[in-house]
């Protein structure tokens, strides 16, 4: 190089720079290095999936309300026969369900002391939410509500719910006639299972637990069906939106449904706030056990989960034990 | 300052060396030629380029509408679901063509185009699943040709309560036959579901795909779907 005249050296330098620039502008001059991953030619099935489950650390609280509205009645202006807090910990893919007995005698904002189920009558789902928030100090993110007919339809839309009926039921009032064991309940039977309280030793407490049992069964079934055929999730989400009344937007329903497919239903704690029964001014009411109420609420507020130590004994224990 | 420079330039005429004009042009031309040859593009000068991807279209089954409004007009939604399917299908055709059929991709481990079909969150996982979602990084070392087989799509489209399409689930069965360099054949089978949402157009937001390849016999001449480069 040093032998070349200065002018020629300059020309060569310019030429090399020009060639390099041209090469850079058009792309690398040779293919990028190949991935070191083993090729998929071993004839072993391979699987790839991405499910957009929520994974935030903040718990999600959904108040699930079952209105006692008959088919010709508006669900919003009747009484809430079933009230459950569904608490989801997205990061841990876990959840808890806590039932509130419908006859719980509580302070209803703007109304005064009354049975919690009347909050729906006095102020719709929003007042039920306010009442539960005041009772538990938990801030509900969403609420969702069904009535008798819409609940039945929802169950029928997904071709029934597979439920492990924990004990025999024989109740004329709710038409719940079941042998114990795993069985698929259609909408009519699922509603009967959810309504039965007359042949349960703890009445409404036991019924509330059974309603939670249906929710756990639904969660397990959604996960199972999704794993078999992911498109089934659309049927579940659509049925929920079509038959339910909710503050959840469709995309939020889908987000929660995706998240639900990641939850291990076997690890969902299903509890009911315990209490005692009594009479107030001629009304048969439930007085919640304040200590347990606070313990459960604080536990849920922490991470959305319920520690086993804080789960009160099952109100159906006498039947489960037998 | 500026007027002075202009004046100097106009007064002093320099003679540009011929080498400064010719050598760069020649070197740039050589550089481009080498680049094209190494990349195997259509305009390759050295060693010839890859043949084009064989023509491929999925067979599409009638789309199903999933309404969320209790009083939905199911006839109208079915028609709308078909429109959604027609809108998405070319994207899925391209996805599988880019992932399995286009030699300029699989010969060179260049699957970048495949992942443009995915929404950002899903794309990150898809890129980590390259060996399942494409013919694979080393396919160019193993295969000579890949020919598409009978492949099907079916759609379920979820509509929001206003009757607008919200989410589509595409069920895919893709089949192809790959001839190895050693003369044996492999049946490529990709089966699964893609969820699509509207994110700057329809994009894949979730997926669940399984590859179940198996050994196969050479296709009979009459049954061959092999595409000629000119096809």
Image (cartoon, coloured by chain):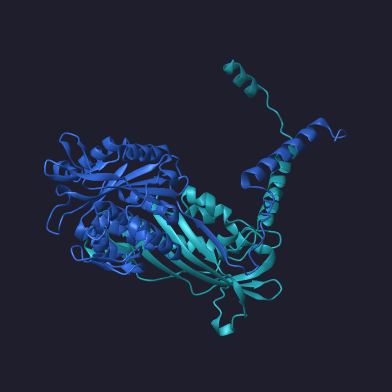
Chain colours: A blue, B cyan
Q: Quadrant of the C terminus of chain B?
A: bottom right
Q: Residue furthest top?
A: B1
Q: How many marks?
A: 0
Viewer can see residue A307? no
Residue lying at 42% horizontally and 39% vertically, measured from the top left: A58
B10 and A149: which is toward the camera: A149
Q: Quadrant of the N terminus of chain B?
A: top right
A251 and A240: which is toward the camera: A240
Q: Residue A306 in the image: state x and y as whole percent.
A: 41, 44
**Vertical comparison of A247 with B81: above or below:** above
Q: Quadrant of residue A70?
A: bottom left
Image-based side of A44 in relation to B27, left or right: left
Image-based side of A176 in relation to B35, left or right: left
**Vertical comparison of A43 with A266: above or below:** below
Viewer can see residue A127? yes
Q: Quadrant of residue A281?
A: top left
Q: Residue furthest right?
A: A3
Q: Quadrant of residue B80?
A: bottom left
A70 and B205: which is toward the camera: A70
Q: Residue B5 in the image: state x and y as whole percent.
A: 62, 19
B42 and A100: which is toward the camera: A100
Image-based side of B23 in relation to A252, left or right: right
Q: Residue A175 in the image: state x and y as whole percent.
A: 21, 66
**Vertical comparison of A19 with A209: above or below:** above
Q: Residue A63 in the image: state x and y as whole percent.
A: 29, 46
């Amino acid at each position: 190089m040093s032998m070349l005249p200065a002018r020629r050296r300059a020309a060569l330098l310019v030429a090399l720079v020009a060639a390099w620039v041209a090469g850079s502008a058009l792309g690398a001059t040779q293919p990028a290095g190949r991935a070191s991953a083993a090729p998929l030619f071993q004839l072993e099935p391979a699987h790839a999936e991405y499910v957009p489950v929520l994974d935030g650390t903040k718990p999600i609280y959904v108040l699930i309300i079952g209105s006692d509205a008959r088919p010709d009645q508006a669900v919003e202006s009747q009484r809430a026969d079933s009230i459950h807090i569904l608490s989801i910990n997205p990061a841990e893919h876990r959840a808890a369900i806590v039932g509130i007995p419908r006859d719980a005698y509580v302070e209803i904002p703007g109304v005064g002391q009354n049975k919690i189920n009347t909050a729906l009558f006095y102020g719709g789902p929003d007042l039920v939410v306010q009442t539960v928030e005041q009772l538990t100090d938990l801030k509900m993110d969403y609420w969702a509500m069904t009535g008798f007919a819409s609940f039945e339809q929802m169950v029928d839309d997904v071709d029934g719910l597979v439920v492990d009926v924990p004990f025999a039921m024989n109740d004329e009032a709710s038409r719940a006639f079941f042998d114990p064991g795993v069985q698929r309940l259609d909408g009519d039977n699922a509603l009967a299972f959810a309504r039965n309280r007359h042949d349960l030793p703890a009445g409404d407490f036991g019924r509330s637990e059974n309603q939670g049992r249906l929710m756990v069964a639904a969660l397990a079934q959604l996960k199972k069906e999704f794993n078999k055929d992911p498109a089934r999730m659309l049927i579940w989400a659509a049925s929920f939106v079509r038959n339910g009344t909710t503050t959840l937007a469709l995309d939020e329903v889908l987000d929660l449904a995706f998240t639900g497919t990641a939850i291990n239903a076997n690890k969902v704690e299903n509890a009911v706030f315990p209490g005692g029964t009594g009479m107030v001014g001629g009304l048969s009411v439930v007085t919640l056990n304040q200590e347990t109420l606070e313990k459960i609420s604080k536990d849920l507020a922490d991470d959305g989960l319920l520690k086993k130590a804080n789960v009160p004994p099952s109100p159906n224990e006498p039947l489960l034990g037998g | 300052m500026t007027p002075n420079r202009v004046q100097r330039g106009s007064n002093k005429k320099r003679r540009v060396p011929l080498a400064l004009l010719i050598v760069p042009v020649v070197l740039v031309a050589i550089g481009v030629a080498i680049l094209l040859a190494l990349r195997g593009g259509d305009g390759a000068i050295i060693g010839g380029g890859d043949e084009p991807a064989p023509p491929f279209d999925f067979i599409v089954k009638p789309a199903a509408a999933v309404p969320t409004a209790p009083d939905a007009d199911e006839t109208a939604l079915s028609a709308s679901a078909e429109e959604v399917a027609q809108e998405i299908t070319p994207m899925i055709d391209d996805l599988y063509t880019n992932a399995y059929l286009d030699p300029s991709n699989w010969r060179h481990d260049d699957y970048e185009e495949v992942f443009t079909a995915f929404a950002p969150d899903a794309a990150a996982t898809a890129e980590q699943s390259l060996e399942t979602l494409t013919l694979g990084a080393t396919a160019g070392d193993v295969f000579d040709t890949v020919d598409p087989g009978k492949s099907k799509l079916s759609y379920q489209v979820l509509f929001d309560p206003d009757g607008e399409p919200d989410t589509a689930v595409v069920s895919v069965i893709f089949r192809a036959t790959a001839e190895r360099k050693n003369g044996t054949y492999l049946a490529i089978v990709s089966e699964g579901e893609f969820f699509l949402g509207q994110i700057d157009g329809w994009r894949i937001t979730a997926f669940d795909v399984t590859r179940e390849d198996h050994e196969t016999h050479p296709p009979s001449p009459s049954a061959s779907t092999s595409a000629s480069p000119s096809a």
